[in-house]
Image (cartoon, rainbow, N blue to C red):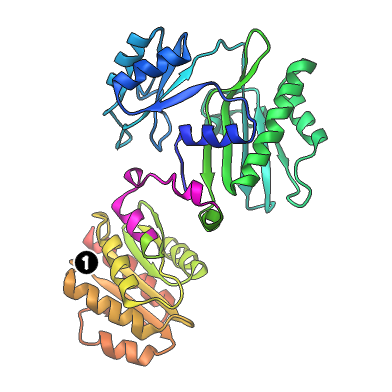
Amino acid sequence: MKIHEYQARGLLLQYGVPVTPFEVVSDPRAARQAAERIGGTVVVKAQVHAGGRGKAGGVKLAKDPAEAEAKANAILGMSIKGLVVKRVVIARAVDIAREYYVGIVVDRATKRPVYMVSAAGGIDIEEVARTTPEKIVKHPVDPAKGLSADEAASLASAVEARPKQAALVAAVIAKLYEAFVGVDASLAEINPLVVTPDGEVWAVDAKMNIDDNALYRHPDVEAMRDTDEETRETTLAREMGLSFVKLEGNVGCLVNGAGLAMTTMDLIKYYGGEPANFLDIGGSSSPDKVVAALDIITSDPNVRSILVNIFGGITRCDDVANGLVAALKTRPVSVPIVARLTGTNEEQAREILSEHNLVPAETMDEAVEKAVGLARRGA
């Protein structure tokens, strides 16, 4: 789950990270009042789940409260990557002598949290990784032991040579790891972490993504979810217990089981197609889940064929078939559907589907080849 910058700032404050004073507001008048309370020059920052806010005009400096009101008025209501700005952060601006990137991400290769620090802070870290990867220092953390003081000091010294400031940076690095573990984050980053000309260290931006599977342990964080930032399809998938990721292809996928879903997408690419989505309906799927899944897939105008690939272990093939029939009755589909259902109650499933205009397939390869071919013809 993504959260806004102001929410990430609040979580980092709880763990002792020095975050520049800030307030979040939703109207220009409140922006003026916040700037008056904070004092001095402030930065007005759009709050949307999208990168590139500065390039889009969503981050502006204001020298006084009147200018903060004007800048907030300009930013509120603007669209950044299709998302409408409904809130802005008013934060104290600080002079910057040096700026760093500090972040942690779960690394699947090492199966550990990996710390990343770089002296090239304040810019797109993905661009740094692509063009000058040597500027990023990486360090995997043993989750059983946590981040030691020596490890934090070593990471800090990689970007800050002065002992006093290096100690302050090391403290932030340690506290960021505490926050990362404490809220079950999958990503936590400060970009930039700055050192002022006076030697102070401040986090002036923050980003955190939370592991959806751990949200049951954090109802306060779950309450931070902003459904206005989600698509209708993402919200529906979450409410129905479906795992869904939108992709850019034209072969819609309705599959049970994450492993089978990944294999299905790989096979689509092997046969020259492009999957339109990852969609796992899970085990013990009710017909209602299948109806919702088909609704989600057909909402994508790029979809030119739909591949239903079900292996019935826990999931009953006849449940999936009944869901398909129910969905087709309530929402007729204009693109061809290829159905491969094998396993528990597969005979009943084939009988249910035999009266409907679906393209049958017995093997996975056959199903994928047919779906890819139909998508090409429908493009």
Q: Which residue is mark 1?
A: 335
Residue drawn at x 26%, y 84% as measured from the top left: 353
The x, y position of residue 98, in whole percent, is 63, 15
Q: Nearer the viewer, residue 109 or 338?
A: 109
Q: Nearer the viewer, residue 106 or 369?
A: 106
Secondary structure of the residue carrying tag 1 is loop
Residue drawn at x 42%, y 84% as measured from the top left: 342
Specify the segment rendered in magenta. 218-238
Say what amino acid the circle numbered 1 marks.
Val
Rendered-image quadrant of the C terminus: bottom left
In the image, is residue 46 above or below residue 66? Answer: below
Image quadrant where residue 116 sits: top right
Residue 248 lies in the magenta-colored region: no
Residue drawn at x 68%, y 12% as measured from the top left: 199
The x, y position of residue 20, in whole percent, is 55, 21
Q: Nearer the viewer, residue 13 or 127?
A: 13
Left or right: residue 344 versus residue 332 is: right
Residue 236 lies in the magenta-colored region: yes
In the image, is residue 284 above or below residue 293? Answer: below
Few, some or many C-alpha atoms within 10 Å of disc 1 (few <14, some 14-19, many ≥20)?
A: some
Predominant SS along the magenta part: helix
Residue 55 visible in rendering? yes
The x, y position of residue 64, in whole percent, is 39, 7
Residue 137 visible in rendering? no
The x, y position of residue 329, in whole percent, is 17, 75
Left or right: residue 227 versus residue 181 is: left
Residue drawn at x 53%, y 40% as measured from the top left: 208
